[in-house]
Image: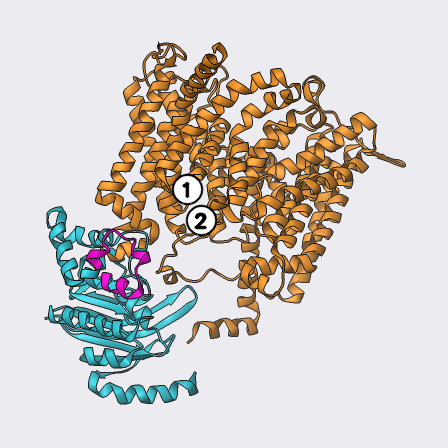
Amino acid sequence: MLLAASTGEDLLRAVLQGAPPGSVYALIALGFVLTYKTSGVFNLAFGAQAYVSAAMYFQARNEWEWQVVPALILAVFILAPLIGLVLERLIFRHLSNSSAVAKLVIAIGLTVALPSLFELVTGFSAVAGRTPTGIIPGGSSVFYDPFGIYPLSRDELAQMAVALFGMAALGALFRFSSLGLALRAVVESPRMTELSGINADRVSAFAWALSSLFAGMAGVLIAPRFNTLMAPDFFHLVIVAIAAAAIGRLASLPRALLGGLGLGIFIALFNTFLPRWTADHGWLRPFQENLTPSMPFVILFGVLVCWPAIRREHRVVDPLSGVDPPPPGLAALTRNRRLTLITRVFSVSLLCVIGVTVLLRADVRWLFLVTQAVILAIIYLSITVVTGFAGQISLCQGAFAAVGAFTVFQLADRYDLSVLAAALVGAALAAVVGAVLSLPVLRLGGVWLAIATLAFAFFFDAVMVKFSWIGGGGTSLFQGTRVPRPTIGPWDFADDRLFLVLAVVAFTVVSFLVIQLREGTTGRMLHALRGSEMAAESIGISPVRARVTAFAVSAAIAGFGGALLAIHQENVNYQNNFSPTAALFWLVLVVSLSARTIEGAAYSGAAFSLFDSLVLRGEVFRWIFRGWVPGILPISPKWRFVLFGLASIQFSRHPEGLVEYGKRRATRRFNERFDRRERDRASQETSP
Amino acid sequence: MSPVLELRGVSASYGPFRALFGVSLTVEAGGSLALLGSNGAGKTTVARVASGLVVPTSGSVLVDGEDLTGARPHQYARAGVAHAPEGRSVFATLTVAENLRLSFRRTHGASGLSCALDRAYDLFPQLGNRRSQMAGTLSGGEQRMLSMARVLVNPPKLLIADEPSLGLAPIIIDEVYQSLRAIREAGTAVLIVEQQVGHALQLCDRTAVLGHGAVEWEGPADEATDVMVGQMFTTGEDG
């Protein structure tokens, strides 16, 4: 009897404990669903928006010592909607007919760019241990305990009240107001709404402002739960919100609310009861320690993979979508053979000059950066395969790379295996992980595939890395995850110059393999699938087989690259190199430069590793102008995130990437000027 | 009195693909024009230009003597142009009543709304029976009725109907054309894009025949039949 009572008490306590964070999840999920419904944008940047509002509020309260109300008005009621309006006006309005995947990539770019941009503009920086305050005086110190079980703080009560109020307001808006009706009409077809005499742009701008307001409010409300205000925490928040929104199939607002609340309570229940079960069953212990922080990702992954209803989401097609011009074809330009030869010879010789210069003259720092660039280029080739060839957005390339890196660490540490052999084993293991992961995930397709891989990446980050047989466990915290450099015969690769040569050789070999894949049967199949899945299937191509191959190959390349990176740095450095958020930036970088070509991967590697030193610190100007550097330099390395994050906006217009786009444009201009046949053809095209 | 719609030398394109080459057309106030032509002649593009969905690359569009070139579709709608696009022209995810509310809200205000709804249900009792049903689940004929109800209750200056007979049974087509006749009698000018030549010619006074994105012939509707027959026999040759 006593036991039953205490179990009931625990249940109630968990519910009370989980409801406040649950309501904040619900708040974000509501805004998320609102944006998705009205603009079709899977707005991952929601976390970034919440972070910006929370940081603004923190800045106003703690730095400028404003009162609660003006700070709240500035952060939530002015800044948050303003960001929404700017995003809608400058970016998403022009994308209304782009694919959902293109919009997702841009949202990822914004996730990377927004927090850095805010920090650069306001000079805000996270200071450890300075806990944000809530919106209610004494929010975290005054408690109410209605049931005598769990004391709810004022902050928590405020969170629940705001979430309920937000839901009620949204429901009333959609049900009773004509603006709500217009919102729903715009979801289906902005153009038909226009034909009814309604300014559709203004309606969707309103939707963005409103949903951003939700994000901002949620950000300010949840901030007191974090010890230190940092952008990645808010990104986690969005993952939870996506899980909540996915429960409502991204369409139903009430279900998103319930999903958010339910998730909060479920996590609290889990945290209450799992420790007891582990007391009885010892084998559960490692899970208890690691699973708790990763519950949202596990739930998201589970919902996506196990709930087929999500896949069958049918979108009503805009009957007026034919008004838009067809997307530009991706057919390769026919290049003049002599021109190709000239540019190839030129670029190869330029590369050789750079290579020799680096080998002979570079100091330790530059050698390190250039080697890192080459190895990252190998990892980026994995994105070329999965995103460029197979057309799938995978956000877990960091996890694949980490599998390779940790394999090298474990095999070298335990069995004293040669690290190069271990790197190959790592690549094979990553391929297995990739193939196994791809089986359930590939059926999702499109945006959901990207989100499922993201969930996996965070799951790997929160759970798998903590296991001692992967990440080295507690000992690696003190000793690091040390990896030795290899020796082959007379060559000792502890020498940085020699290792650079090794990296270049590895990059060449992997590039060659990737080209073989592209030109071979699998590459052709992937190309056909990208054109039209249905048409490809009708001529007997199995989409699953081709894509699983692509996934496995991509994972193997990432694993191999990750292993090399660990060998190069003589340490796995998981947090710096392979964390999920780092991998997000990889994708943004590769996709905005060029995901379809080997060059694109090489440029991306260089951009990741060298852009900071070359451009932002002004080294390039120092070399060219003999010591002179423009006055504004050096500027913060955060600009790298801002610039490349914003560059991903180009993805919808130039899905081939900026590098490839520039090259094609240059070729076309060259042809128009110098090649008479080409000019004749061009003039014929424009006449009827 | 200025014509309700005037296109002056309009050219239009979808990205790199040009669809119209210097089309000039007028529809007089209360008049009617049937726009005929083979597939790909540019009929639908003319309709889209006339309601602001496609912005012309050159030339100008005048509604009631006012230059609306480059204006947004909702500005055309507010100037009195109603466009029923090809195929589905109702909001599939809204109910019948909501579809009607969406178009009456601006013109009738909150107070006149229920009155306007009642008139729509009087005109088409079938719609009244299905008022809380999603419009996407209506049959093709009922969807046409719904879009007709929107314009009949609230007659615009100009109605552009793009293939109003597409995919409908002959008996329903007759009903649709009866409604169109009623709209004409209410004083609305009509621009009809049609492949069902017979119906369109009966309804309209004037006819324009499009081919390869340009006006090939324009004249009274009763002279059009011969021209159409001639065009049918020639289009196959010059592609």
Q: Residue A398's spot in the image, x, y percent?
A: 62, 36
Q: Which residue is drawn at 69% across and 60% down?
A: A521
Tell me the amino acid under the disc marked 1: Leu
Q: Which residue is drawn at 33% across and 69% down?
A: B45
Tell me the amino acid under the disc marked 2: Glu
Q: Residue A412 or B103: which is nearer the viewer?
A: B103
In cyan, which chain?
Answer: B
In orange, which chain?
Answer: A
Can residue A304 be seen here? The reply is yes
Q: Where does label 2 land, which residue?
A: A313
Marks 1 and 2, the one that precedes in the sequence: 1
Q: Residue at x 38, y 76 (%)?
A: B39
Q: Residue A467's spot in the image, x, y percent?
A: 67, 25
Q: Is residue A660 above or below residue A289?
A: below
Q: Residue B146's spot in the image, x, y percent?
A: 23, 61
Q: Is residue A528 above or below residue A152?
A: below
The kind of secondary structure element at disc 1 is loop
Q: How far apart are marks 1 and 2 (CA)?
A: 9 Å
> What residue span does the magenta drawing correspond to?
B127-146
Q: Quadrant of residue A415?
A: top right
Asked if labels 2 and 1 touch by Cβ distance under 8 angstroms, the answer is: yes
Q: Where does label 1 land, which residue?
A: A250
